[in-house]
């Protein structure tokens, strides 16, 4: 998928921040700054994954199976799409758990297809 590197690099950077905070064992209930950073990272990741799901879905619908090149394009986009959906589900779960730990509420999932 052309241009996918930028979207996935942004998601990876955001999840790196989230991973650092969770790996440090930050007590979210007693550290508002930690919770805010964690939620911001998850929200940025969610936005990037939603964009990736949309773009790969459009590519899957728009790519014709016209020989090896078409098959390769479809395969690559299907792999990226599947990985984005799975990652989105995990981001949604982490977001819901973080909100629960901080006593906040959620207005729907971050990542939708």
Image (tube, rainbow, N blue to C red):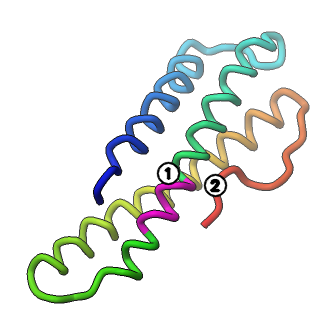
Residue 17 position (above or below residue 52)? above
- The disc at residue 87 is 1
Tags 2 and 1 touching, CB below 8 Å: yes
Residue 100 position (above or below residue 85)? above
Q: Locate residue 22, reporting x and y percent.
A: 58, 22
Residue at 65% of width from left, 61% of height from top?
112
Q: Quadrant of residue 7?
A: top left
Residue at 90% of width from left, 31% of height from top?
103
State which quarter of the image contains the C terminus.
bottom right
Q: Nearer the viewer, residue 21 or 40?
A: 40
- The disc at residue 111 is 2
Choose mark 2 or mark 1, whichever is in front: 2
For residue 85, side relative to residue 73 (left or right): right
Q: Which residue is outermost to the left?
A: 68
Residue 111 position (above or below residue 13)? below
State which quarter of the image contains the N terminus.
bottom left
- How packed mark 2 is, by other alpha carbons closer than 10 Å (few <14, some 14-19, many 20 or more), is many
Q: Quadrant of residue 29?
A: top right
Q: Locate residue 110, reporting x and y percent.
A: 69, 50
Q: Locate residue 92, reporting x and y percent.
A: 66, 49
- How packed mark 1 is, by other alpha carbons closer than 10 Å (few <14, some 14-19, many 20 or more), is some
Residue at 60% of width from left, 46% of height from top?
47
Q: CA distance from mark 2 to mark 1?
A: 9 Å
Mark 2 or mark 1: whose residue is earlier in sequence: 1
């Amino acid at each position: 998928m052309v241009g996918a590197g930028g979207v996935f690099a942004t998601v990876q950077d955001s999840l790196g921040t989230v991973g650092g905070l969770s790996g440090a064992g930050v007590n979210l209930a007693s550290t508002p700054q930690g919770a805010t950073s964690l939620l911001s990272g998850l929200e940025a990741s969610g936005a990037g994954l939603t964009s990736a799901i949309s773009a790969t879905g459009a590519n899957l619908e728009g790519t014709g199976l016209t020989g090896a090149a078409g098959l390769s394009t479809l395969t690559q986009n299907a792999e990226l799409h599947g990985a984005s959906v799975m990652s989105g589900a995990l981001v949604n779960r982490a977001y819901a758990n973080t909100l629960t730990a901080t006593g906040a509420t959620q207005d729907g999932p971050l990542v939708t297809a």
